Image (tube, rainbow, N blue to C red):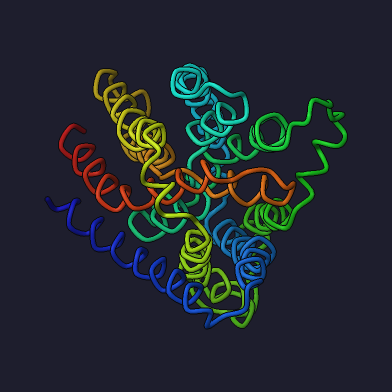
Amino acid sequence: MSVFLPTLTQMAFLFAFIVLGYILSKLKVVPDNSAGVLAKLENNLFIPALVMGTFINNFTINKLSSAGKLFALSFIVMVITIPLSILVSHLCAKDTYTKNIYTYGMSFSNFGFMGNAIVSALFPDVFLEYLIFTLPLWIMIYLWGVPSLLISDGSKKSVKEKLKNFLNPMFICMIIGMVIGLISAPLNLALPSWIISADGSGGVIGVAGSCMSPIAMILTGMTVAKIDLKKAFTNLGVYAICFFRLIAFPLLFIGIFALIPPLFAANEWYAFVVCTVCSVAMPLGLNTIVIPSAYGKDTTVASGMALVSHLLSCLSIPVIFMILNLVL
């Protein structure tokens, strides 16, 4: 229970912002384009600032050795989850588009907005490792998830076109943060406190990064407010997908870690376990709504997935972390 209650409290805190976003949108207190504006602020300012600040203060030469292991572990997770996601989606849906939506939702959770918010709050000591761990997930999203599952129209995009997706603020700020983090100690370099404080919480970068979690949850609420609630709650296929995303996948990896002995030092192994379980325990992501809608595609099923999974995750995530604490 020592893990369950703090996690439940954090989920309640985040869910309160989701409710606020929902109410603001439903009451039309904010303009119709507010969700789009917040999404741009998240992707172009708040998330890049959070990532840059984390790497500036924590990424050192000593961390390079574990980065390769985190990459390898992340790819192993995908090798397990993606084939299972494809199999389950074919059992739960008939038409190709719905299968693709289900496959994407199970393959890639909301490890970005929701994952960053939860890990930074509950496991701040492994947040850097979590960001490194999720890099291969972003790579797979850009190279396969989005072009092949969400916006596929039958035509194939060149590798060059896919690689352009990596020229975004988050990846650019991550590289800048890596460089500054690596050279800070050898060169005895310290950035001015108005840019970023020593503990990473102050300065322009620190304060901007701290806005990520509440704004992400408000954005989620605004997105959910546009969903047809009746259709969302009456689609049985959505519940099956949520079960695998929120319960089956996390328990699978908890079981795997429980069966194998620690392969590395205790602190490093702890970080690997937390990163893996956090990434697979998050609810279904919002990309299945935001991206297809920009291309005029139907988002009814995706909206139901997002709404139901985010509601259920308020209880499932604390339970999963409690089980993880008991088993390991």
Q: Position of residue 260 (x, y in %)?
A: 29, 18
**Is 289 placed left or right of 294 in the picture?**
left
Q: Residue at x 62, y 24 (%)?
A: 96
Quadrant in which the C terminus appears: top left
The number of discs equals 0
Counting from the top left corner in percent of width and height, residue 249 is at 36, 29
> Which residue occupies the foreground of this view, 315 or 113?
315
Indicate the position of residue 299 as horizontal and vertical percent values.
59, 45
In which quadrant of the rendered view does residue 271 lie?
top left
Q: Residue at x 50, y 50 (%)?
A: 128
Q: In terms of depth relative to the viewer, which is nearer, 189 or 249?
A: 249
Q: Compared with residue 10, is residue 81 higher up or lower down, i.e. above or below?
A: above
Nearer-the-camera pick, 144 or 325: 144
Q: Quadrant of residue 193?
A: bottom right
Task: Give the quadrant of residue 278.
Answer: top left
Image height of 58 relative to 321, above or below = below
What residue is at 40 percent from the left and 38 percent from the top? 235
Q: Is residue 266 left or right of residue 84?
A: left
- Residue 308, given in percent of the width and then of the height, sits at 38, 47
Report the residue at 24% width, 63% height from top.
9
- Say which of 28 and 170 sits in front: 28
